[in-house]
Amino acid sequence: MPIRQFQAQRMHAPRDFQSIENSPICVEIGAGKGKHALLFSEQNPQLKLVAVERTREKFLAMQKQHQLEGQDNLTPIHADALPWVVHALYPQQVQHFFILYPNPEPHNPAQRWLNMPFFEFLISRLQTHGTITLASNIPEYIVEAEQQLQKVWNLPYEKQVIASDSARTHFEIKYLERGELCQQLVISKPENYATRFDGFQPLQGQNTQVIEPKNVK
Ligand SMILES: C[S@@+](CC[C@H](N)C(=O)[O-])C[C@H]1O[C@@H](n2cnc3c(N)ncnc32)[C@H](O)[C@@H]1O
């Protein structure tokens, strides 16, 4: 693969990290205020979902709504998804990843999910025949992701247009109300797909960053 290798072992544990058991789960990355996470966990009581959100206010909104609704198959997590995935998830553990309307990173293409070396690590956590759903209202974002899937990741996908009455997330509602085209790629992991992280076990809080007090000799 032409992309450089993700430095997983260098990832510091997220603050207050708690490990999870090695059983099949679904994971939403950048869950925002949790609209999709709450709906999905209600509609799929047989599946467990972990919803990760980095922005504190959005995470708190998701957590508050979760406390009201009480789905016991949903776990909201306040963390940056990269270190959380590296510390928490086992190889081939995840049934479905959801990345819905990620930040387009207009000035920083290297930070888009499929352009990051981290994406190889993410694929290693996915079960065979598991899927990654990536939705966007930006046609160029979808086109670039398709090119990465074909040229770099060598993964099959299906491209879908989101129905104009869909309302899975707050951003989806906003974009569809504006009449924008929303699309998603449902990426699947074929049998015998290998990554350089297939043997990498979760760090489980090792590598916790120790902040040394300043001026101590
Ligand atoms: C454009 S918003 C979309 C939110 C939600 N998925 C929706 O459609 O309403 C993107 C979200 O991803 C979150 N995010 C971006 N990078 C992240 C990361 N590395 N880990 C966790 N969350 C992240 C941001 O905080 C933001 O809430």
Image (cartoon, rainbow, N blue to C red):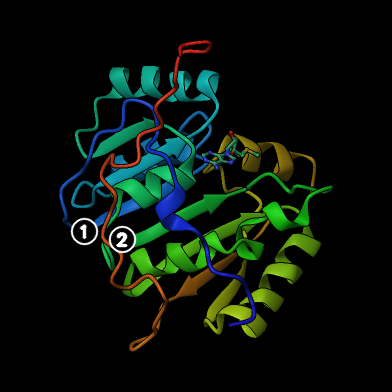
Residue 197 sits in quarter: bottom left
Question: Does residue 121 appear left or right of residue 69 in this picture?
Answer: right
> In the image, what residue occupies the spot 25% across and 34% down?
18
Given the current orientation, which residue lies at the most extreme bottom position?
192
> In the image, what residue occupies the spot 26% across and 62% down?
93
Disc 2 secondary structure class:
strand
Q: Nearer the viewer, residue 173 or 156?
A: 156
Identify the residue position indicated by label 1 in the image.
24
Disc 1 secondary structure class:
loop
Quarter of the rendered structure image containing ligand 1: top right
- For the C terminus, give its image quadrant: top left
> In the image, what residue occupies the spot 15% across and 48% down?
21
Q: Nearer the viewer, residue 174 or 207?
A: 207
Question: Does residue 204 appear left or right of residue 135 in this picture?
Answer: left
Q: Nearer the viewer, residue 143 or 161?
A: 143
Q: Which amino acid does the dot numbered 1 rest on?
A: Pro
Residue 115 higher or lower than 25, as above or below: below
- Image coordinates for residue 195, horizontal then vertical, percent: 42, 77
The label shown at residue 94 is 2
Residue 19 higher or lower than 25, as above or below: above
Question: Does residue 21 appear left or right of residue 33 in this picture?
Answer: left
Q: Which amino acid does the dot numbered 2 rest on?
A: Val
